[in-house]
Image (cartoon, rainbow, N blue to C red):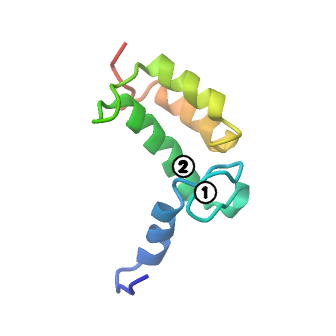
Amino acid sequence: MAATELEGAQRASLVIRHHHEHYNGLGYPDGLSGEEISICSRIVTIADSYDAMAVTRSYNDAKPHLEIMAIMHKETGEKYDPEPMRVFCEIIESSKFKTAKI
């Protein structure tokens, strides 16, 4: 990794690097699991997944909120850490960032 003088850059780069790690250890790039993955990365994983499913991308159409949440609940304990996922579920239901797609 290239050195930078920005405070927190090293930590931020690891959060970004590890946001595709899965709670059960089957993610990438480093095969981390559980508490080996920083809490920041585990939170970013949840937010990134929700956003990826809520917005139309070149590879998929936007999904409705209930479908997204069903998928994410199914993957909790595997892809997502159950505790931050529990908090996310509480917050997203009243959030202005909840997808409007029905």
Evaluate whether residue 96 shows in this view. no
Of residues 17 and 97, which is closer to you in this image?
A: 17
The quadrant of the rendering that contains the N terminus is: bottom left
Asked whether residue 1 is in view, the answer is: yes
Q: Are marks 1 and 2 in contact (CB under 8 Å)?
A: yes
Q: Is residue 77 left or right of residue 72?
A: right
Dot 2: element = helix
Q: Residue at x 63, y 50 (%)?
A: 22
Q: Is residue 48 above or below residue 63?
A: below
The mark found on residue 39 in the picture is 1
Disc 1 residue crowd, few under 14, some 14–19, many 20+, Cα 10 Å: some
Q: Residue at x 71, y 59 (%)?
A: 35
Q: Could you say which is closer to the camera, residue 59 or residue 100?
A: 59
Give the vertical position of 15 relative to 52 (above or below): below
Can you give x and y, in whole percent of width and height, for residue 93 in the image? Answer: 48, 24
Amino acid of disc 1:
Ile
Which residue is painted at 57% across and 22% down in the image? 70
Q: Which residue is mark 2?
A: 43
